Image: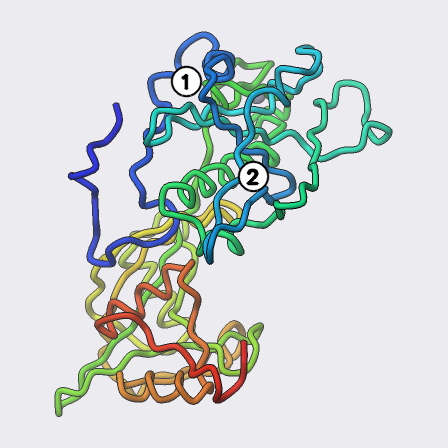
Amino acid sequence: MRPTRDVFPSSPLGTVLLGTYPVSRSGAERETTDPIGAALRDPRVRVLPLRDGSMPVRAAEGSARLAWRGSEELTGEDPARRGEQELAHLGTSSDGAPVVLDFRPETLPEQMEAGDPWPGDRPECADETWEGLREVAPRLDAEEATWATIAVALATWHAEGPHCPSCGSATRIAHGGWARVCQAEDREIFPRTDPAIIAAVVHTDDAGVERLLLGHSTRWPEGRFSTFAGFVEAGESLEAAAAREIWEESGVEVDRVEYRGSQPWPFPRSLMLGFRARAVEREAARPDGQEIAHVRWFTREELESEVLAGRLILPGAVSIAHHLIADWYGGPLPEPEPEGGRSF
Ligand SMILES: [Zn+2]
């Protein structure tokens, strides 16, 4: 069933860009005998080609739209070679069209070996560009950003899963593209998601002044700071993972962690679980020197003045880190003044 739009599920973070739109996934259709064939026979079908993580988009007045295809490019080919196994029925768009992902590999025919799936093309149209999810998502509307996120997550999983993790045999696509089946054991294998925590660490001093702790990664350009993040380890709760990652990266102990919202991050298969964590002592902060080169506390006024002066670069709106910082800041984050400071 399609979710009702007036019961849109929200978290304290509000609408995070990727994956929050309640699209109608193909939960029921994918269990039918030929979900992809049925979707392709519907004249309204929208097919999204994905090649090496990129998708075709068209510019539209400061924003962008996905350049959906019809089914002609798929059904016009010899069905035995059209690569129908490299397709997934993602669901139904808000206006009732079936949504299909075409994730055929981008391989030149002369590089193919017997048994390889038929490759997909990547036509360059004058009014289209091919862009990755991170680049295009901020310009897509919430529904298209969500379809694109599902597409990247699923295609990445398929690309990494041609063999059974148990016995190493070849697997085939099943359930409308939402699972694979081991050919030897008939075992079903479903997409995995790796949970990762991301936390805004905050402190309130005796005078009532609130500060946010941000870290600068050793891999980042000067001035870029963000919240702390890391993968949840085996047998670990989210709260323990948040406390451990914050302590490892910043030296700060936290005595309270509060869930604020989540975001899929399919690079390649993370689910970012966002928290606000309360620091016990501000003075303990120090970088780990490995992943984090600098840590710094910011009051709201310092955060704003450093951004406006071009000395502080905050994460972009595509990431949940941006929303966690804005959640603490209490509104939209400041942006550097165009005429002053550096351009990023
Ligand atoms: Zn197997």
Residue 102 % position (x, y):
58, 29
| Residue at x 20%, y 32% (from the top left corner) | 4
Amino acid on which disc 1 is placed: Arg
**Residue that mark 1 sits on:** 30
User: Helix or strand or loop: what does disc 2 sit on?
Assistant: helix
| Label number found at residue 108 | none
Q: Taking 279 as reference, is 193 above or below it?
A: above
Left/right placement of residue 319 relative to residue 299 reads right
Left/right placement of residue 221 relative to residue 113 reads left
Number of labelled discs?
2
Within 10 Å of the Cα at label 2, are there few (<14), some (14-19), or many (20+) other Cα atoms?
A: some
Amino acid on which disc 2 is placed: Thr
| Residue at x 27%, y 61% (from the top left corner) | 275
Residue 304 % position (x, y):
33, 84
Q: Which quadrant of the rendered structure holds the C terminus?
A: bottom right
> Mark 2 vs mark 1: which is more N-terminal?
1
Q: Taking 224 as reference, is 236 above or below it?
A: above
**Residue that mark 2 sits on:** 156
Q: Which residue ends up furthest to the right in the rendered image?
A: 110
Q: Which residue ends up furthest to the left in the rendered image?
A: 207
Residue 286 % position (x, y):
41, 84
Within 10 Å of the Cα at label 1, are there few (<14), some (14-19), or many (20+) other Cα atoms?
A: many
